[in-house]
């Protein structure tokens, strides 16, 4: 019997299709780490992805389980992840989206980090933005790994204590994806906030952890984040709205209440949140302020240019 801790891999899905979903599942089976279980959690799919999940659960009952909400409801990402968490048996929990992939050594290397750093609540690294899945030469050139890992101000391959990573999240200097998390920590923070059905649900979850627990940041990437027009983020962008503003006020309003509840309302994070919320709560003043700021920048640029021209004329 293996001495390695059991890892519960959770893939939530809603109309995941066939190709991407199967590739995501197979990337779990391809792991070099063998002591895992896979929970395929259905958020009320109406396409063939339900049958795909059931087929894997029937073929590999010792490794794969199928879960769904009562009456096959569609309840959103957070509630669906929480369903998987409640039924998980592992010491560690990993989340994989139904259209993304893990590298084969993901669980092996991430588990080794958590094993050797017992104070770490979770481990994560940068992710690869994956365009080359299409096989097109131009898309191959577009692949890149998140650049925040190269920021000299962000320590990597070490344990970071709160609230440092939380502040980086607020300032949008870092993103957390493809993480391996201790189940005990997830239970302590109350899992995902179910009012966030999609977009910002992961930031809310990670904020709760980063405010209270040390986190290990690796400089290695394990996660392939597939870029395609039917992804949740792409659909948001195609809705002709600014993706960065969708649900963002709700996110910061929630953070404000959460920090108040936890007694973190006299911190640097609190000040950042208040500054962010001011623009949403005072849209007219914010618009006037931005307009004035833009005019002043243009005036300064013109004055600087006039000064250079005057110096040139004197010469």
Image (spheres, grey):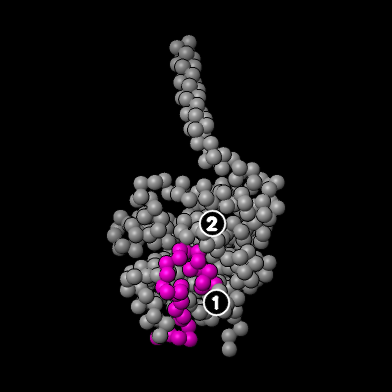
- In this picture, residue 267 sits left or right of residue 94: right
Vertical side of 233 occupied by 102: above or below: below
Vertical side of 294 occupied by 46: above or below: below
Residue 40 is drawn in which quadrant?
bottom left
**Can residue 158 be seen?**
no
Residue 69 is marked as: none
Residue at (48% x, 10% y) in the render: 314
Residue at (54% x, 77% y) in the render: 87
Residue 88 is marked as: 1
Q: Residue furthest front?
A: 71
Q: Residue furthest left?
A: 136
Tell me where residue 192 appears, x and y as whole percent. Answer: 55, 63
- In this picture, residue 149 sits left or right of residue 22: right
Alpha carbon distance from label 2 to label 1 = 22 Å
Tell me where residue 284 appears, x and y as whole percent. Answer: 49, 33
Q: Which residues are magenta?
A: 59-85
Identify the secondary structure beneath mark 2.
helix
Residue at (42% x, 70% y) in the render: 73
**Label 2: which residue?**
203
Q: Is residue 80 magenta?
A: yes
Q: Nearer the viewer, residue 149 or 284?
A: 284
Q: Residue furthest top?
A: 314
Q: Is residue 213 magenta?
A: no
Quadrant of the drawing holding the N terminus: bottom right
**Can residue 210 be seen?**
yes
């Amino acid at each position: 019997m293996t001495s390695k801790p059991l890892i519960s891999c959770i893939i939530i899905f809603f109309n995941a299709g066939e190709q991407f979903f199967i590739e995501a599942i197979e990337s779990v089976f391809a792991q070099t780490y063998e002591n895992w279980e896979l929970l395929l959690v259905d958020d009320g799919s109406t396409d063939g992805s339900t049958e795909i999940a059931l087929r894997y659960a029937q073929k590999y009952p010792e490794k794969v389980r199928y879960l769904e909400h009562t009456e096959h409801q569609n309840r959103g990402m957070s509630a669906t992840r929480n369903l998987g968490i409640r039924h998980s048996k592992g010491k560690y929990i990993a989340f994989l989206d139904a259209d993304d992939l893990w590298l084969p050594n993901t669980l092996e290397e991430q588990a080794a980090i958590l094993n050797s750093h017992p104070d770490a609540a979770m481990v994560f690294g940068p992710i690869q933005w994956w365009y080359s899945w299409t096989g097109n030469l131009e898309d191959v050139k577009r692949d890149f790994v998140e650049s925040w890992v190269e920021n000299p101000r962000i320590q990597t391959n070490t344990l970071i204590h709160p609230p440092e990573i939380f502040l980086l999240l607020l300032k949008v200097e870092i993103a957390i994806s493809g993480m391996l998390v201790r189940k005990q920590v997830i239970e302590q923070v109350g899992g995902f906030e179910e009012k966030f059905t999609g977009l910002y649900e992961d930031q809310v979850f990670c904020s709760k952890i980063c405010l209270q627990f040390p986190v290990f940041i690796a400089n290695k990437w394990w996660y392939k984040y597939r870029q395609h027009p039917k992804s949740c983020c792409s659909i948001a962008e195609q809705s002709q709205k600014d993706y960065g503003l969708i649900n963002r006020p709700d996110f910061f309003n929630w953070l404000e209440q959460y920090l108040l509840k936890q007694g973190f309302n006299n911190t640097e994070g609190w000040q950042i949140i208040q500054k962010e919320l001011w623009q949403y709560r005072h849209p007219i003043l914010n618009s006037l302020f931005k307009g004035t700021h833009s005019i002043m920048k243009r005036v300064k640029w013109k004055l600087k240019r006039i000064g250079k021209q005057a110096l040139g004329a004197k010469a």
